[in-house]
Image (cartoon, rainbow, N blue to C red):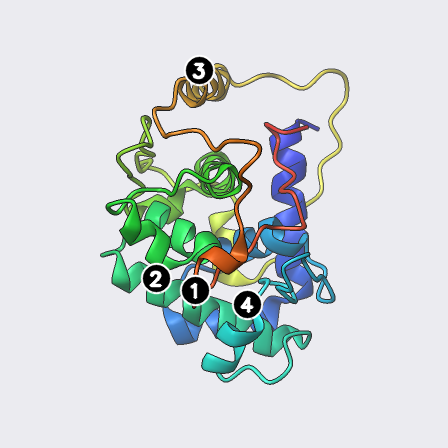
Amino acid sequence: MMKNERVRERILSIYRRYKSEIDEAAANTGLPPELIATVIYHESGGNPNAVSRAGARGLMQLMPRTARGLGVTNSFDPRQNILGGARYLRGQLDRFNGNLALALAAYNAGPGNVQKYRNDIPPFQETQRYVQSIGKVLALGFPEVFTRYTFQAPSLKLPVQPQASPSPTASWFASGQSAPSHRMRGRPRKDPLKELFVAVWADVVDQRSAPPIEEEQPFEIEQLAGEDTRVLEFIPRTPFDE
């Protein structure tokens, strides 16, 4: 099984495990369940008890202050955490006019930082990697998400374009069906379009114009008064990182 297929299966596994909670959050916020499940995968890997070094908690890694503002009393309760995280992401999408790239950057680094850098992805390595990873996974696994949102930023040189036909997994989320498991014999066939997409994106990322962060001046939570920011404890497992 190809790496991107394994990641998609992991995300679908998270969806199956928390189907009722994700579907409820999707109904309440209007977010696609695919997007919620993908964010959960990147935030915690599906671990409801995950805690980052900065103190973010639960499946969608809510900071205590943010959780209180969202009415979440127990961040380790999957239903409360997913509902709270989905509401917060919905709020960022509204704030940035449906631009998913900026909304994800705000979810990770705080909306104040996105605005500070003139509505661009902040030049924090963690945030840049976070937005790029989710964009890549959605583009290859759940492209139908991009028919609803834009995915652009000044420092993002290769904006994601919507695809005309939905991925096969769209019906699994829409109908609640379980994703079928397939055993592939021999070497899997490579999709040349996907290979080209990965190669071009990797080349673009290497030439990003965003200012680098000096190693001796790491990103400090305390410097961002009142912002919901954190350095992720969980490093996203994407087909491009393995």
Viewer-side label of 1, 3: 1
Is 140 left, or right, of 93 in this rendering?
Answer: right
Mark linked to residue 92:
2
Label 2 SS: helix
Q: Which residue is mark 4?
A: 22
Mark linked to residue 83:
none
On the image, the x and y values in percent for residue 9 come to 66, 44
Does residue 194 show up?
yes
**Three-letter amino acid code of the residue under disc 3:** Asp
Q: Give the position of the N terminus as an image quadrant.
A: top right
Marks 4/3: CA distance? 35 Å
Q: Nearer the viewer, residue 159 or 178?
A: 159
On the image, the x and y values in percent for residue 83 come to 51, 74
On the image, the x and y values in percent for residue 102 come to 33, 49
* Residue at the spot 62% in from the left edge and 30% down from the top edge: 239
On the image, the x and y values in percent for residue 216 come to 57, 34
Marks 1/2: CA distance? 19 Å
Does residue 179 show up?
no
* Residue at the spot 40% in from the left edge and 17% down from the top edge: 207
Marks 2/4: CA distance? 18 Å
Q: Nearer the viewer, residue 12 or 180?
A: 12
Is 45 left, or right, of 193 in this rendering?
Answer: right
**Three-letter amino acid code of the residue under disc 1:** Ala
Q: Is residue 116 above or below residue 17?
A: above
Q: Give the position of the C terminus as an image quadrant.
A: top right
Marks 4/1: CA distance? 31 Å
Q: Residues within 10 Å of mark 4 (few under 14, many from 20)?
A: many
Q: Which residue is mark 3?
A: 203
**Three-letter amino acid code of the residue under disc 2:** Gln
**Three-letter amino acid code of the residue under disc 4:** Ile
Mark linked to residue 225:
1
